[in-house]
Amino acid sequence: VTARHFTKYFKFPEDAPKELVKFDFQRSGIFIFDAWVENSSGELTQTLHYGERAQFVLRVLALDAMCNSVNSGILFKSLSGLDLYGWSHAWCRNQYLKINDNQMLELRFSIVVYLNDGTYFITYGLENADGVTLDKHCDLTQITVVGGPKTYTTSLVNLDCSLTHKTM
């Protein structure tokens, strides 16, 4: 499954082309280090069925939590790069995630797959209460949706997202 066992600890050489090093948030001490998708049966998958509830799961590690108020977010984009749906924990009225040093969290974004047939990319991010990005992974997960409308859409969608988390 795409991005399963993804690790943030790969270091680019100092002379690497800048386009390879688009995001460098490692100084925050909080990392997204694993991501995967589960279907409504709890199975790892990249193929989801229209209308089912799916879980987009992240594992987050705080080695040195320079801030203990963290927002998490998810963004769905079409194959052509069009933003279709985004959700941020910041919309929960200042109910930030509290992360301590040397703590691991599992975040579960639960969505209803109201996307047309096709391929989509998912971006994940973490930021502090001031909106400063702590970690971000663009297009980390790829999914394919089947069983839905076969038309191309450029409209925003409501995926009825909710977030749960637990300490590992």
Image (cartoon, rainbow, N blue to C red):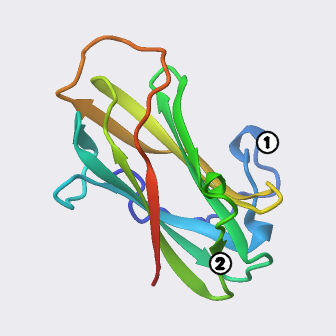
Q: Residue furthest top?
A: 151
Disc 1 marks which amino acid? Lys
State left or right for residue 53 relative to residue 110.
Answer: left
Residue 28 in the image, given as x and y percentages of width and height? 77, 69
- Residue toward you, 92 or 65: 92
- Residue toward you, 143 or 18: 143
How many numbered marks appear?
A: 2
Mark 2 lies on residue: 98
Please rate how many residues cluster around mark 2, counting C-alpha atoms within 10 Å: few if below 14, some from 14 to 19, many from 20.
Answer: few
- Residue toward you, 113 or 4: 113
Mark 1 lies on residue: 18
Residue 89 occupies quadrant: bottom right
Residue 19 occupies quadrant: top right
Q: On screen, 149 above or below 22? A: above
Q: On screen, 70 above or below 91? A: below
Residue 154 visible in the displayed image:
yes
